[in-house]
């Protein structure tokens, strides 16, 4: 409760609030003052060891994907293959791929001009028609798939396997994507009045224009699609210097091919899948595991993807090495905010575990007779509704139930399902204290009331759908 008051009422920075509450909690629980700071340091270190690698490399890959115009490449490629009548499907596919490595706010802003252009060419009355299904689904992916920080930190707290989480999360996400499409069709039966500025911008879009990535200062503020604990950075191009002069190389830069973008995004997923599957099916001690475990390590897979992105999306398309390095280094700035907040959340989780408070809370909740799967979903949902950040909600929930899960007899797949249930809960009750709410409604031209009727309803629907599928899998998987 103190954490929620500090963040939502007193408006403390999440990083400071988490650390302060962790220190006070440790002292109040009887931890010796001389042991408090070592506990804080250990909690920070154990969390950042894996999370910093994944978030940092994912952000650098996302940076070059963003600046190279990869979102537009994918959207136009899918649209040309699926046809104009399936522009919405093309956008959803492109958005799904872009949302895996890139923070929601930047990814959505990159897609906004494409949404406008496709909607105008299809004769739609507003960008909401195409924007509504993709935006909530992108946030859902952010909250339930690694390498995004909240879900990654939660699975680390529970002793889970990131590769298994990714594979199971993708299985759950596919039907959730279909629900997003059909739910959006239902909500779009109503005409929503666009805000005047969006109406002007939408009307000015040529019906034959090819959308380009957003240039210049984008909004970057939300990071995790919930609560503003990450920095989105700008969604700008790579041809402008800080003083506004156009870089000479921008005139010679070429656009990446579809296969190059897909390779950078899909190769790490394939590598992680290979490592995970072989670990599950091959017997312990098998000679191949020595190599597949290395190839399939999420951090190594993302490192390979980042190196590929440096060359395929940068150097190969006539960008100077120094410029590509600058683009990828700049992406670490916004990611650093997320990493630090995630580390502070790890400190809080470590204190809850070391003092026994987390186990006591978990045992008290389980004593009510509620099964653990709905328990973690509701706990994450309550934290999400109260303070807005999906990252903080997922990580705090993971810390509270960590002792119970680690001491329980749960399989690696069951731990992944528990983590996805946490992610669904952290995606559920999204409203005006969620930065993603404001980013989405602003760019789609929705009023606050219409945003609550569309964005919030979609977020809850997708969360419940993902949770229902997770419950079904819980019954059938070992």
Image: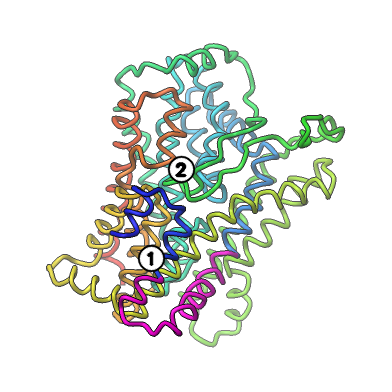
Q: Quadrant of residue 469?
A: bottom left
How many residues crowd around disc 1 within 10 Å: few (fewer than 14), some, or many (20 or more)? some
- Indicate the colouring scheme: rainbow
Question: Label 2: how many residues lie within 10 Å, few (<14), some (14-19) or many (20+)?
Answer: many
Segment tinted magenta in the rendering:
23-52
Above or below, 118 relative to 313: above
Depth check, front residue: 104 or 121: 104
Q: Residue at x 64, y 41 (%)?
A: 66
Question: Is label 2 in a helix, a strand or a loop?
Answer: helix
For label 2, the residue is 138
Asked whether 199 falls inside the magenta stretch, the response is no
**Distance in Å between CA atoms under marks 2 and 1:** 31 Å
Q: Compared to 429, does 475 lie above or below?
A: below
In the picture provided, is 283 more to the left or to the right than 9? right
| Residue 159 in the image, given as x and y percentages of width and height | 42, 74
Q: Which residue occupies 56% across, 44% down? A: 232
């Amino acid at each position: 409760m103190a954490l929620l008051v500090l963040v939502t009422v007193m408006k403390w920075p999440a990083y400071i609030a988490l650390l302060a509450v962790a220190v006070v909690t440790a002292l109040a629980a009887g931890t010796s003052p001389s042991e408090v700071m070592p506990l804080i340091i250990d909690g920070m270190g154990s969390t950042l060891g894996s999370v910093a690698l994944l978030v940092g490399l994912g952000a650098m890959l996302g940076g070059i994907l963003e600046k190279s115009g990869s979102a537009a490449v994918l959207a136009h490629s899918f649209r040309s293959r699926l046809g104009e009548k399936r522009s919405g499907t093309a956008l959803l596919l492109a958005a799904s791929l872009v949302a895996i490595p890139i923070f929601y706010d930047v990814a959505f802003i990159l897609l906004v001009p494409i949404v406008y252009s496709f909607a105008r060419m299809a004769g739609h009355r507003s960008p909401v028609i195409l924007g509504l299904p993709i935006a909530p689904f992108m946030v859902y992916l952010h909250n339930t798939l690694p390498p995004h920080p909240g879900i990654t930190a939660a699975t680390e707290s529970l002793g889970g396997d990131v590769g298994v989480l990714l594979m199971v999360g993708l299985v759950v996400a596919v039907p959730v994507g279909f629900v997003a499409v059909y739910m959006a069709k239902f909500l779009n039966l109503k005409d929503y009045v666009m805000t005047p500025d969006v109406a002007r911008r939408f009307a000015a879009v040529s019906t034959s224009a090819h959308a380009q990535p957003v240039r210049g200062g984008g909004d970057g503020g939300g990071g995790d699609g919930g609560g503003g604990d990450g920095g989105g950075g700008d969604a700008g191009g790579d041809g402008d210097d800080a003083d506004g002069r156009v870089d000479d190389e921008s005139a010679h830069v070429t656009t990446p091919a579809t296969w190059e973008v897909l390779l950078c995004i899909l190769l790490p997923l394939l590598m992680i899948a290979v490592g995970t599957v072989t670990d599950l099916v091959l017997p312990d001690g098998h000679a191949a595991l020595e190599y597949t475990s290395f190839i399939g390590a999420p951090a190594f897979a993302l490192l390979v993807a980042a190196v590929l992105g440096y060359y395929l999306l940068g150097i190969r398309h006539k960008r100077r090495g120094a410029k590509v390095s600058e683009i990828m280094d700049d992406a670490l700035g916004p990611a650093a905010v997320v990493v630090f907040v995630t580390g502070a959340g790890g400190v809080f989780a470590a204190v809850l575990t070391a003092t026994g408070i987390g186990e006591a809370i978990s045992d008290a909740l389980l004593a009510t007779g509620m099964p653990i799967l709905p328990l973690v979903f509701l706990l994450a949902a309550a934290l999400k509704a109260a303070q807005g950040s999906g990252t903080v909600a997922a990580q705090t929930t993971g810390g509270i139930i960590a002792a119970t899960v680690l001491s329980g007899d749960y399989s690696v797949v069951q731990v992944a399902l528990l983590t996805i249930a946490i992610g669904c809960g952290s995606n559920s009750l999204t409203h005006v204290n969620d930065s993603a709410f404001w980013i989405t409604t602003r760019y789609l031209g929705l009023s606050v009331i219409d945003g609550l009727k569309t964005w919030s309803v979609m977020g809850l629907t997708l969360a419940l759908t993902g949770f229902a599928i997770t419950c079904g899998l819980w019954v059938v998987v070992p």
